[in-house]
Image (cartoon, rainbow, N blue to C red):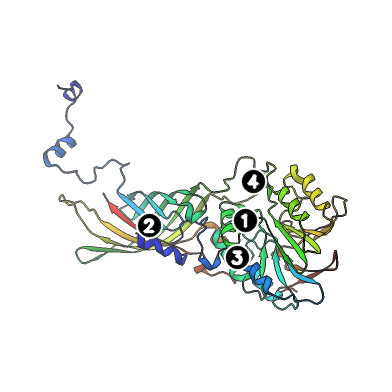
């Protein structure tokens, strides 16, 4: 029996759909990707950072393949950022199905955790396959701050998002010209902990280098300054919409947003 | 010392037979007594799952009740999984004196997982926020079984069987149905390996 349980390595003998057990090569992808990204020269000219932003790959595997094919035809892309809800049911196989497709991208991809990724044992699975729920990285003069804003998954309770951590990250932008915050649930959504909206938005308002706040979750493009405080909030499409954004950042807080339509109907 | 109760109660015919021959009479087990014990790994219901089972309808139908366990190391939290599995094996082929094959076993299971990290607390979500259950899974199984035929001195069967079952679950099947190009049947299959022993 013990020898037979060793078969879990081939993943067919599954102990639970909620299990976290992964081949070593598929663990800690965020750290692996960031190491790779630091070695890559920027794809665009001058001081421009250019990346693909898309949300919610959850249960859209056919569409994810079309998305990868489309992004691979783009030129001058530094990386792809997936704005959470990588999985739909928080199951290990779903994460792996998405990763198997996204690793076909010619550029590295990074993620932030979504509410569906925290269902069941999803949190432990996300931490195992990608890494920390809150993390930052610097690339092309830009500090990218990625954090878990899925308050409802923790029963609210003013714990998530970690506003103190966010404030600290926004204050310490040494070596960066500008900052971008990426999360899954935007503070305008009812799944964001209402008790933390004032401090969260104040932290963003207090950072003069902040370009904007990017989110997924709502599966559609929205843009505006909902708190009327000069801070821009953008949301992007889900994979089901057959659309994604290409975001270019340059100068101090300059940006350009391009929308790409792909797939059979494009 | 004698016990008045024992003295007062007349011996039943069954207990007379048992006492005189030392054997259990065939087919006289109470209905609630399980026929076999089960030990399984995989199939989404535990690293190790153990339980008991009942045979119905000339031993071709079986209902197994299992409790499975997955340690924290493999799941991020320690999971306890309760499962009811019903299988039907229409063909029983003898192989020599000692062996027996059931080439086809079809069935289904329902499992409930306790101990997940995010255990849907009351009031956490509005009704229907997540339309699926994170803890209850249902799925089909398809497999085969090889049994070694043993008998008690009185001639009652006490087979020991090895089985495998390929299975899946509701959420995997749904993922496949909606992504027929990207996913294959192999992507959504699980394998379980197990032993069943009559007792």
Q: Are marks 2 and 1 in contact (CB under 8 Å)?
A: no
Residue that numbered label 4 is attached to? A154
Q: Are marks 3 and 4 in contact (CB under 8 Å)?
A: no
Question: How many labels sit on residues?
Answer: 4
Mark 3 to mark 4 CA distance (whole Å)? 24 Å
- Could you tell whether B189 is left or right of A161 in the image? left
Query: Dot 2 lies on which element?
Result: strand
Residue found at x 70% / y 49% = A162
Neighbourhood count class around disc 1 (C-alpha, 10 Å): few under 14, some 14–19, many 20 upward? many
Residue that numbered label 1 is attached to? A117
Q: Which mark is residue A29?
A: 3
* Figure check: B163 above or below B77: below
Farthest residue in the left direction?
B20
| Label 2: chain letter | B
Frontmost of labels 1 and 3 is: 3
Residue that numbered label 2 is attached to? B88
Neighbourhood count class around disc 4 (C-alpha, 10 Å): few under 14, some 14–19, many 20 upward? many
Q: Are marks 1 and 3 in contact (CB under 8 Å)?
A: no
Same chain assignment for discs 2 and 1: no
The answer to which of B22 and A86 lies nearer the viewer is: A86
- Could you tell whether B24 is left or right of B111 in the image? left
| Label 4: chain letter | A
């Amino acid at each position: 029996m013990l020898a037979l349980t060793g078969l879990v390595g081939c993943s067919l003998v599954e102990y639970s759909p909620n299990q976290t057990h992964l081949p070593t090569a598929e663990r800690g992808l965020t750290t692996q990707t960031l190491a790779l990204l630091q070695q890559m020269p920027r794809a665009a000219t001058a001081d421009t950072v250019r990346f693909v932003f898309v949300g919610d790959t959850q249960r859209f595997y056919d569409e994810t393949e079309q998305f990868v094919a489309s992004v691979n035809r783009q030129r001058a892309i530094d990386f792809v950022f997936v704005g959470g809800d990588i999985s739909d049911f928080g199951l290990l196989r779903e994460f792996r199905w998405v990763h198997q497709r996204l690793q076909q991208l010619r550029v590295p991809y990074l993620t932030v955790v979504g509410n569906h990724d925290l269902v069941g044992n999803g949190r432990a699975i996300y931490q195992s396959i990608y890494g920390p729920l809150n993390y930052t990285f610097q690339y092309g003069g830009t500090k990218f701050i990625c954090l878990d804003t899925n308050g409802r998954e923790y029963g609210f309770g003013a714990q998530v998002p970690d506003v103190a951590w966010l404030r600290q990250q926004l204050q310490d932008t040494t070596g960066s010209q500008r900052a971008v915050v990426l999360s899954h649930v935007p503070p305008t959504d009812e799944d964001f902990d209402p008790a933390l909206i004032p401090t969260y938005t104040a932290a963003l308002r207090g950072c003069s280098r902040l370009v904007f706040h990017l989110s997924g979750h709502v599966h559609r493009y929205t843009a505006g300054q909902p708190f009327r405080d000069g801070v821009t909030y953008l949301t992007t499409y889900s994979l089901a919409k057959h659309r994604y954004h290409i975001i270019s950042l340059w100068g101090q807080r300059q940006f350009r947003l391009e929308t790409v339509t792909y797939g059979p109907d494009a | 010392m004698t016990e008045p109760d024992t003295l007062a109660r007349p011996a039943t015919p069954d207990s007379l037979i048992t006492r005189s021959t030392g054997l259990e009479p065939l087919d006289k087990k109470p209905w609630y007594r399980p026929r076999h014990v089960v030990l399984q790994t995989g199939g989404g219901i535990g690293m190790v799952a153990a339980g008991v089972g009942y045979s119905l309808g000339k031993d071709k139908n079986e209902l197994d009740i299992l409790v499975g366990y997955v340690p924290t190391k493999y799941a991020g939290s320690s999971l306890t999984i309760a499962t009811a599995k019903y299988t039907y094996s229409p063909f029983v082929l003898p192989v020599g004196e000692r062996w027996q094959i059931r080439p086809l076993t079809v069935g289904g299971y329902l499992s409930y997982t306790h101990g997940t990290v995010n255990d849907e607390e009351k009031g956490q979500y509005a009704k229907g926020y997540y339309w699926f259950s994170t803890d209850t899974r249902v799925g089909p199984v398809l497999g085969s079984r090889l049994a070694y035929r043993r008998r008690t001195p009185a001639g009652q069967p006490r087979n020991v069987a090895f089985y495998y079952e390929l299975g899946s679950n509701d959420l995997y099947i749904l993922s496949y149905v909606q992504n027929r190009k990207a996913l294959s049947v192999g992507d959504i299959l699980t394998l379980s390996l197990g032993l069943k022993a009559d007792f």
